[in-house]
Every structure is written in structure tokens, then in C-alpha cells.
């Protein structure tokens, strides 16, 4: 396994996807980073558009690298995927996110439905045998009901790994974990992917929300909301930055949203203070 990952890292390196120095995200480097506490999670609230209440949060990883400073996941996640280190990093993300969400259950002060945590999973993770069981074991350890976990996947061609991916999704959904299609509409053959994987949630990509303006419509966002309704799926809009966008989404029946209008990704403590602990009246 390690040999295979190394081979792929070298192959990708030669293919110029990883340039010189890209090996900072090698399996060994990521393991060291995890051991040294260089990774941390931020959480972005998922908001009920009707009430403004947070129904959950998405975990977003950051790397405080000793020499590179704060690195964005948009930079290091693709490198981790190429080197194979995404699997060990992903396990850490799953464990930390679930432990945090288990905390929220205890800290939450007001009588609202349970707060869930959304976790991003790379294709490589979903295609690892035992991924589903791992997530469920972490839920059991932390005392978090699996129904409070949502796994976000992207539209990827799983190719020969499709059977393993489907098995993991079956294990997860069988225990109540929700499966969400992230960045919907930006990948390839979106519609066929929709029927390939059993889903619970579709996320409207922020690029289709960004175009919504007081004068401008977003046909793709509109269609995604209708598609979700027809398929009986929940729909979450991401990248909501203005009240006009929120209003547009509400009018079309989109119930859930994330975005800077409500909160940037913040540390867990801040998420708890701002969204879970009832403000004193
Ligand atoms: P994503 O899953 O699509 O996450 C949404 C990204 O949009 C996040 O960027 C978030 O900070 C940003 N965002 C949220 N609201 C707004 C808004 O109102 N306006 C704008 N302009 N941006 C907004 P971030 O945190 O840099 O993450 C980038 C990507 O890295 C994520 O995209 C996801 O694909 C990946 N990623 C992050 N954490 C993980 C992880 O733990 N595992 C894996 N596999 N991928 C991750
Ligand atoms: Ca996501
Ligand atoms: Ca997304
Ligand atoms: Ca994205």
C-alpha cells in the first residue's frame, strides 16, 4: 500500500502536478504534521434559512506549516490526494470532527434539533476498504449518533473503485449517516453520477450562488433546487454572501445555506458561542 502511494506520488511528480517541493504533503510529512499538531479544523455553520438557526457545521481543515505558514486546503488537499497522505489526514479529520460534534450535543443550551457535522471526504478515502466502518467506529467511541454526521463527496469518476465506494456508502447510510453531493454541477456528467450514488443532500456550488444578484437569476441554482425536490433530496446552498441571495434561495424553496453572510469558517469554540449557546435575553 505504502509502496503504491509512493509510486503514485512519484508518477504525479513527473507529471508536473506536484512541482519540486510539493512533497511537503508526502505521507511522512503529513504524519509529522499531525504528530506536531500543525493541522486544525474550522467550522462553518449550516443555517436554516427560515429561522437563522444553525442546524450543523461543516468541518474545514487548515495546515499551520512550520515553514510555509498557514496553507489553504485548496493547495494541500490535492497534494495529499496525489501522495496518498489524504487517507491518514482524513482519518484525523473524521476523528476530530466527530469528537467535536459529540461535544456540541453536551454544550447546546436550547431546545433545537440535534446539531450535525459535515465532513469532506476525498474519492481516495471513500475508495478505501473499511472507510464506512471507521466512521461508524468513531461515532461509537465519541457517543455521537451516526445520523448527526454528513459525509460530503464530490462528483468523481470512481472507475474500478466504484464497488468499494458503493459498499462504504451502503454501510454509512445503513447506520443513518447522510451522504451529500458537494459542488454539484461543477464536475463531469453530474446527472449520471446522481443515480450512481445513493444520496441524501445536494450542495449548490458557490459559483452558482455568486451570480445571484438583485437583477440576476441563477438558472443552475434554480434547476438544482427543483432537481433536489424531484429526487426528494435536501439542498444546501453554499457561498451565500448577501441577503438578496438568501432571499432568492428562500423564495425558491431552498431551506439550508452556508456562507459569509452567516459565518466564515471559525474555531469550534466560536461556533459554539455564536450558534449553539442561547444568547441571554
Ligand atoms: P468546499 O468543501 O467546497 O468548502 C467550501 C469552501 O468555500 C471553503 O473553503 C469555505 O471556507 C469557502 N466559503 C464558505 N463560505 C463562503 C462564502 O460565502 N464565500 C466564499 N467566497 N467562500 C466561502 P476552504 O475552507 O478553503 O476549503 C476549500 C476546499 O478544500 C473545500 O471546498 C474542500 O473541497 C477542501 N477541504 C477542506 N477541508 C477538507 C477536508 O477535511 N477533507 C477534504 N478531503 N477536503 C477538504
Ligand atoms: Ca464541502
Ligand atoms: Ca462545496
Ligand atoms: Ca469546492
Image: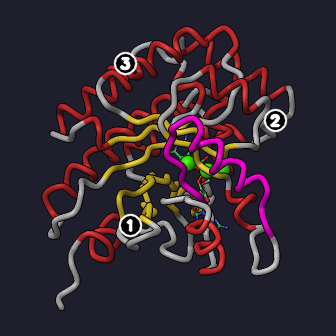
- Residue 84 placement: quadrant: top right
Mark 2: secondary structure: loop
Q: Nearer the viewer, mark 2 or mark 3?
A: 3
Residue at x-position 24% and y-position 35%: 139
In this rendering, would 133 be left or right of 181? left
Q: Earlier in the sequence, mark 2 or mark 3?
A: 2
Q: Which residue is mark 1?
A: 267
Farthest residue, direction right? 15
Quadrant of image for the C terminus? bottom left
Boundaries of the magenta span: 217-238
Residue at x-position 40% and y-position 73%: 52
Q: Which residue is mark 2?
A: 17
In this rendering, would 72 be left or right of 100? right
Residue at x-position 65% and y-position 79%: 244
Which mark, by number, is residue 171? 3
In the rendered image of this protein, does residue 90 appear above or below residue 218?
above
**Label 2 Cα crowd, 10 Å radius (few <14 / some 14-19 / many 20+):** some
- Give the CA separation, mark 1 to mark 3: 30 Å
Residue 247 is a magenta residue: no
Amino acid at each position: 500500500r505504502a509502496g503504491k502511494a509512493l509510486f503514485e506520488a512519484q508518477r504525479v511528480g513527473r507529471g508536473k502536478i506536484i512541482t519540486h517541493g510539493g512533497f511537503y504533503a508526502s505521507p511522512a510529512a503529513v504524519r509529522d504534521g499531525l504528530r506536531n499538531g500543525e493541522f486544525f479544523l474550522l467550522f462553518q455553520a449550516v443555517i436554516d434559512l427560515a429561522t437563522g438557526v444553525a442546524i450543523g457545521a461543516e468541518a474545514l481543515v487548515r495546515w499551520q506549516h512550520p515553514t510555509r505558514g498557514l496553507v489553504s486546503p485548496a493547495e494541500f488537499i490535492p497534494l495529499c490526494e496525489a501522495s496518498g497522505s489524504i487517507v491518514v489526514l482524513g482519518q484525523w479529520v473524521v476523528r476530530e470532527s466527530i469528537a467535536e460534534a459529540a461535544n456540541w450535543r453536551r454544550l447546546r443550551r436550547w431546545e433545537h434539533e440535534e446539531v450535525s457535522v459535515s465532513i469532506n471526504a476525498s474519492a481516495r478515502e471513500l475508495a478505501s476498504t473499511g472507510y464506512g466502518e471507521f466512521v461508524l467506529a468513531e461515532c461509537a467511541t465519541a457517543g455521537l449518533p451516526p445520523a448527526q454526521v454528513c459525509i460530503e463527496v464530490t462528483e468523481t469518476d470512481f472507475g474500478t473503485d466504484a464497488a468499494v465506494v458503493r459498499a462504504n456508502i451502503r454501510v454509512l447510510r445503513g447506520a443513518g449517516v447522510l451522504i451529500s453531493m458537494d459542488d454539484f454541477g461543477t464536475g463531469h456528467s453530474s446527472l449520471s453520477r446522481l443515480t450512481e450514488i445513493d444520496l441524501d443532500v445536494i450542495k449548490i456550488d458557490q459559483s452558482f450562488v455568486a451570480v445571484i444578484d438583485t437583477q440576476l437569476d441563477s438558472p443552475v441554482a434554480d434547476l438544482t433546487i427543483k432537481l433536489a425536490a424531484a429526487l426528494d433530496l435536501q439542498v444546501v446552498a453554499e457561498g451565500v454572501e448577501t441577503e438578496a441571495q438568501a432571499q432568492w434561495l428562500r423564495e425558491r424553496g431552498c431551506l439550508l445555506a452556508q456562507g459569509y453572510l452567516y459565518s466564515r469558517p471559525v474555531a469550534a469554540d466560536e461556533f459554539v458561542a455564536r450558534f449553539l449557546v442561547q444568547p441571554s435575553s
